[in-house]
Image (cartoon, helix red, strand yellow):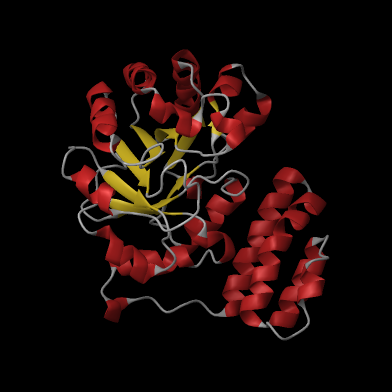
Amino acid sequence: MWLQSEKPLLLLAPMDGYTDGPFRCLIKKIAPECLVFTEFLSAREMAQGSKNLLDKLRFKAIEHPVIVQLYGKDPEDFVTSSKIAQDHGAAGIDINMGCPSKKVVAHSHGSALMKDIDLSSRIIEKVRQNISVPITVKTRLGWENHDQLIPFIQKLESAGLQGITIHGRTYRQKFSGSANWDPIYSLKREVAIPVFGNGDIVDGWTAKQRLKNLDGVMVGRAILTNPWVVAEVRNHLFFEEKDFPSPPPFHQVAALWMEFVEDGAAIMGERRACLRFRKFMIQIVQARRPDSGLRREATQIESIQSIQTLMNKLL
């Protein structure tokens, strides 16, 4: 079971619009030890047989083990969708109890579940009774403060929860201010299940400093501008400094990016995949040739050939 590990675990945060199949494959090529989560998927729509969501459950071999994250509020929807995900090869089910999006919270999904401890417990209990893979939760410190964090997670643990990831901000904070990990360390001392921390992990050193008594860390927004952060974190968690692998030369990095674009094109079509890649290409240009005048070219890519041409210029 993926939750059982002698070493700290490195997790890829589920991020809507980013952690799709091609991006998960890219992360696994950079750091094979990283455990990947899907984007958050609607439990209701999956339970109703949405073809679009079922297509998102087609995993490549390199991705496994894959944890499927679901959001919603109806326990029966979670049961049905969890069974479907498990049947499609999910190695775990993660329940989203932390998304702060107004649209999500308005429907009593995501962070809103923190305010209904009984409903949250029923969801965990019902899903746990109906699947054989681990069930975990990703949530936040609390709604406005962290006063109820420990009782909330203890109740979920009693209902059958097998692992928890805490983002070190409250719902009210959204993504403002700094992540507070102290309540996460306190939580770990009060529960028996694995506890993972998330929030403001920007490099390997940060990850190592914040790990402390936790079972691992989850890396999120930092990898959207620099996916190689996940390798830095891997190195600091799993190796001694003298044994750190050397960073790959740019021609290898470029080859991985091209595979990423091609994987996306196979799923969503070439033009759409290339438009989606623009935000990554801009960051690549800024990191490698900030004064080259190539940024404008990066904002206009529309084909795989145009990306390859720009990569050749960077080489």
Quadrant of the drawing holding the C terminus: bottom right
Quadrant of the rendered image containing residue 242 = bottom left
State how many labels appear. Answer: 0
Image check: 186 left or right of 166? left
Q: Is residue 121 visible?
A: yes
Task: Identify which residue, 163 or 186, lies in the foreground.
Answer: 186
Residue lying furthest top in this view? 76
- Which is nearer the eye, 3 or 208? 208
Picture layout, residue 134 above or below residue 292: above
In percent of the image, x 70 and y 81: which residue is there? Answer: 314
* Residue 69: % across, % down: 48, 35
- Position of the N terminus, as image quadrant, is top left
* Residue 14, percent from left and from top: 50, 45
103, above or below 239, in the image: above
User: Is 312 positioned to the left or the right of 159 in the image?
Assistant: right
Pinpoint residue 53: horizontal percent, then vertical percent: 62, 30
Q: Residue at x 68, y 83 (%)?
A: 289
Q: Give how far across and how far down residue 11 sits, in percent.
A: 40, 51
Q: In the rendered image, which quarter is residue 133 located in?
A: top left
Name the one closer to the observer, 14 or 274.
14
Q: Looking at this rendering, what residue extends furthest in the bottom direction?
A: 291
**x 61%, y 22%: residue:** 45
The answer to whether residue 89 is visible is no
